[in-house]
Amino acid sequence: DTEVTQTPKHLVMGMTNKKSLKCEQHMGHRAMYWYKQKAKKPPELMFVYSYEKLSINESVPSRFSPECPNSSLLNLHLHALQPEDSALYLCASSQEQAFPTNYGYTFGSGTRLTVV
Amino acid sequence: DQQVKQNSPSLSVQEGRISILNCDYTNSMFDYFLWYKKYPAEGPTFLISISSIKDKNEDGRFTVFLNKSAKHLSLHIVPSQPGDSAVYFCAASAAASGTYKYIFGTGTRLKVLA
């Protein structure tokens, strides 16, 4: 299994809703990442988990709450989002957070989030 | 401040010819670079990497060149195939400084014409 699986693929939520994005990998990777990508912009790092511990938080607003229940799973809990949070949310994993690595990240196909 | 720039938002190339995608960076601490390819409705797929100790890395039809003095890297695809049509992102990291964070460029949309 060489994939990162993200669910759901599409999500529409209201500003008062609470929802969660899920990411799963079974490659034995010990680092997992959340990226946000808006249209015609590059992916921007949000969070990094290394060995199930939060290692980097890129000053992300608290309405985004990551969780790493085990080494294969990464969640992103969403609450009280704003319309400007609408974007493609990408999950990625890598063998280790440290470099160098010859293989970069393995990305999931993303969750397209629309906040109404 | 965009530390990694891909100044060509799009590029069209005839099938069989060479595609050259360019990437410039401003941070001299960057020492590890990646290229990713992204199809619509899919996540980015890793293509090829290069460390700053090299100036060239080749993998099949893909070659990445690094010019450290110019802070410039390029991805060459030879020969280009219609299936190469996608958005290509370069990404850079200052690994030696312990900052394991990739900064991505804005992407170049490559269209290979049959």
Image (cartoon, helix red, strand yellow):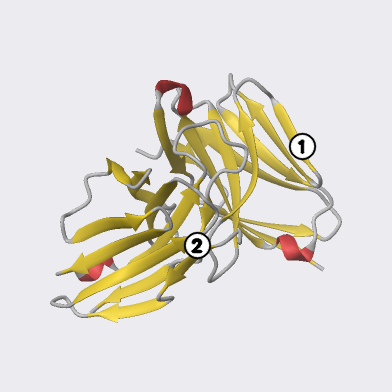
The chain holding disc 1 is B
Where's residue B70, x and y in %? Answer: 58, 23
Tell me the residue at 26%/56% (across/down). Answer: A66
**Residue corresponding to mark 1:** B58
Where's residue A30, x and y in %? Answer: 45, 45
- Residue A7, above or below B37: below
Q: Residues within 10 Å of mark 1 (few under 14, many from 20)?
A: some
Q: Amino acid at mark 2?
A: Gly
Where's residue A20, x and y in %? Answer: 28, 70
**Residue corresponding to mark 2:** A108
Where's residue B81, x and y in %? Answer: 80, 60
Lateral position of residue B95 relative to residue A17, left or right: right
Tell me the residue at 51%/31% (across/down). Answer: A99
Q: Secondary structure at mark 1?
A: strand
The chain holding disc 2 is A
Figure disc tally: 2
Q: Nearer the viewer, residue A55 or A46?
A: A55
- Residue B68, above or below A85: above
Q: Nearer the viewer, residue B52 or A4?
A: A4
Measured in 3D between alpha carbons, the distance from the residue under mark 1 to the one under mark 2, in whole angstroms, is 25 Å
| Label annotation for residue B107 | none
